[in-house]
């Protein structure tokens, strides 16, 4: 009981009501459940003419309206669905070219004051082995990720708990950036740390930003108010729907202009969640001028001693998930789309052509798991939030991507050059970002192939590099000489050269 009272006090300290109220309109937030539900049951013109009109708008990299998005979700004609999927791939190619960015998740703590019905890390789940990494343990995890696997980019994950407060977050991010691991002629290092964490106050977000934060992610989980209340107990911090909903508003107010949103598919009607994600994107565009840099769409997976995760009435089939991803790509065409290792390898491969831009690999989500087993693929469900579907190594994922014609990008240059916020949005909408980032994708892929790739992956990777270099010479001749100079220096052992 004493601990519960302490959590209640923590909740009262964390939530700043004035930082919610300032964004509400007459006390109401921007998710209109009745409007979204009405769109899902309305009769929509799904004729070929209308659907193709909407697709044509998407191809201009313009955000779709709620009605247009609902229309696409109502399409049942297999031929039109196929056209939508082709268009989704075309949009991804136009905006991001053939790059797939890779990252690894790094769980730093799994203590949590919340009690979410679907989450293996919920406070009441006594089956979970709880821990929080010390700074030395954080560095050991990073030594494995940067020195054995070759990752350059992480998404770090924290449980919401007094022991994982803003000071711990700042200290661990700085510790991650400090690690340099000797590799070949140079060293491996994490160059970008994104954060997936609980909603924070503006003051705490400013502290996080000064630590070198990349993208700040907060997923609403479900945009449906009643379902949100059902799965998030009211006496917990996460029980406050609006504190979570306006997390991105506060992030941008604090100077963080690179944000990621998401929904957990399986908590409620997937069509409603797609409209919720669109509503969030439109709200950020209209109020703050910058839409989400990424949208994630994790699908609920089984978790230790968490029956709700397997028994929700809203579990999403593979076919529904495929359609959801297609529609998200068409509805918010500029955004990055993150597909995680929750999905099995076969499913991830099948979804890539629909517009995926980022995916993880060599993923472990047990606290301390990377240092314990740098090359292992085993899972420890008693330490995890959920069960992973794809535990393939980064080398295996890079190899597969190369066989499919994708170049794996380890680039983090844009974030260090100020190409974030409005700048990157303008580049994405104009289709210039994909061309610009191709240069840095080639340089970082050269690095990774030389430092970490297996012989078979390096062999096919060389073919991808030859193709990419030829495209740079053909399509970007003005920068080719400077680019190729950096490429040759990288091939000879230089590291972290970028445009």
Image (spheres, rainbow, N blue to C red):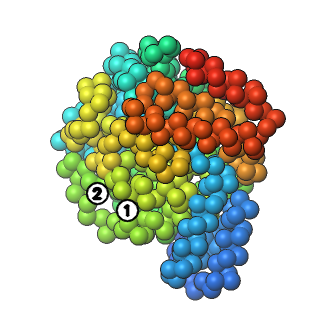
Say if residue 122 shows up in the picture: no
Question: Residue 265 in the image: x percent, y percent?
Answer: 41, 60
Q: Residue 309 carries which label?
A: 2
The quadrant of the picture occupied by the N terminus is top left
Tell me if mark 1 has few (under 14), some (14-19) or many (20+) residues whose alpha carbon lies within 10 angstroms of its own. many
Quadrant in which the C terminus appears:
top right
Q: Which residue is drawn at 57% across and 78% down?
A: 80
Q: Earlier in the sequence, mark 2 or mark 1?
A: 1
In this figure, which residue is indicated by the disc labeled 1? 266
Quarter-of-image position of residue 374: top left
Comparing 171 with 139, the one in front is 139
Closer to the camera in the image, 481 or 98: 481
108 over 136 or under it: above or below: below
Residue 201 versus residue 32 in the image, above or below: above
User: Relative to residue 120, is residue 32 drawn left or right?
Assistant: right
Where residue 245 appears, as percent x and y from the top left, is: 54, 51
Q: Give the residue drawn at x 61%, y 55%.
A: 92
> Mark 2 and mark 1: span between their CA atoms?
8 Å
Residue sitting at 64 percent across and 23 percent down?
488
Check contact, mark 2 vs mark 1: CB within 8 A. Answer: yes
Q: For this rendering, which residue is in front, 92 or 183?
A: 183
Residue 228 appears at what percent x and percent y?
Answer: 42, 58
Judge from the rendering whether residue 23 lies leftward or rightward of residue 393; answer left or right: right
Placement of 10 over or under 56, stated as above or below: above
Q: Can residue 210 be seen in this view?
A: yes
- Give SS at disc 1: loop
Direction from residue 215 to residue 134 in the image, left or right: left
């Amino acid at each position: 009981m004493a601990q519960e009272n302490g959590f209640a006090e923590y909740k009262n300290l964390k939530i700043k009501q004035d930082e919610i109220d300032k964004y509400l309109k007459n006390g109401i937030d921007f998710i209109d459940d009745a409007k979204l539900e009405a769109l899902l049951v309305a009769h929509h013109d799904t004729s070929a003419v209308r659907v193709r009109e909407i697709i044509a708008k998407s191809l201009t990299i313009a955000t779709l309206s709620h009605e247009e998005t609902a229309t696409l979700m109502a399409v049942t004609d297999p031929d039109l669905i196929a056209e939508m999927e082709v268009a989704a791939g075309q949009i991804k190619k136009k905006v991001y070219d053939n790059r797939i960015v890779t990252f690894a998740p790094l769980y730093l703590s799994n203590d949590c004051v919340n009690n979410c019905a679907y989450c293996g890390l919920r406070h009441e789940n006594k089956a979970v082995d709880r821990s929080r990494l010390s700074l030395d343990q954080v560095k050991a995890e990073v030594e494995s990720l940067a020195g054995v696997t070759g990752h350059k980019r992480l998404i770090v994950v924290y449980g919401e708990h007094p022991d994982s407060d803003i000071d711990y977050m700042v200290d661990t991010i700085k510790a991650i950036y400090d690690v340099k691991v000797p590799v070949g002629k140079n060293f491996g290092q994490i160059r970008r740390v994104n954060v997936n964490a609980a909603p924070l106050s503006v003051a705490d977000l400013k502290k996080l930003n000064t630590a070198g934060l990349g993208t700040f992610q907060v997923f609403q989980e479900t945009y449906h108010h009643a379902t949100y209340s059902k799965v998030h107990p009211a006496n917990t911090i996460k029980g406050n729907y609006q504190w979570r909903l306006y997390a991105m508003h506060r992030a941008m107010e604090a100077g963080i202009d690179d944000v990621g949103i998401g929904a957990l598919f399986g908590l409620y009607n997937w069509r409603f969640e797609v409209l919720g994600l669109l509503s969030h994107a439109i709200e950020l565009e209209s109020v703050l001028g910058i839409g989400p840099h990424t949208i994630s769409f994790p699908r609920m997976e089984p978790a230790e001693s968490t029956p709700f995760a397997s028994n929700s009435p809203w579990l999403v089939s593979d076919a529904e998930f495929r359609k959801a991803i297609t529609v998200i790509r068409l509805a918010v065409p500029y955004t990055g789309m993150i597909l995680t290792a929750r999905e099995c390898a076969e499913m991830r491969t099948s979804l890539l052509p629909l517009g995926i831009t980022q995916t993880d690999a060599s993923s472990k989500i047990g606290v301390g798991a990377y240092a314990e087993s740098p090359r292992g693929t085993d899972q420890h469900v008693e330490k995890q939030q959920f069960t992973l579907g794809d535990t393939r190594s980064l080398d295996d994922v890079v190899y597969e991507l190369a066989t499919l014609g994708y170049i794996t990008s380890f680039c983090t240059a844009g974030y260090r050059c100020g190409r974030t916020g409005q700048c990157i949005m303008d580049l994405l909408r104009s289709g210039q970002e994909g061309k610009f980032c191709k240069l840095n994708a080639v340089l970082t892929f050269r690095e990774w192939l030389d430092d970490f790739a297996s012989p078979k992956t390096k062999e096919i990777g060389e073919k991808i590099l030859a193709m990419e270099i030829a495209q740079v010479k053909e399509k970007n001749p003005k920068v080719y000489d400077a680019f190729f100079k950096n490429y040759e220096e990288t091939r000879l052992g230089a590291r972290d050269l970028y445009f």
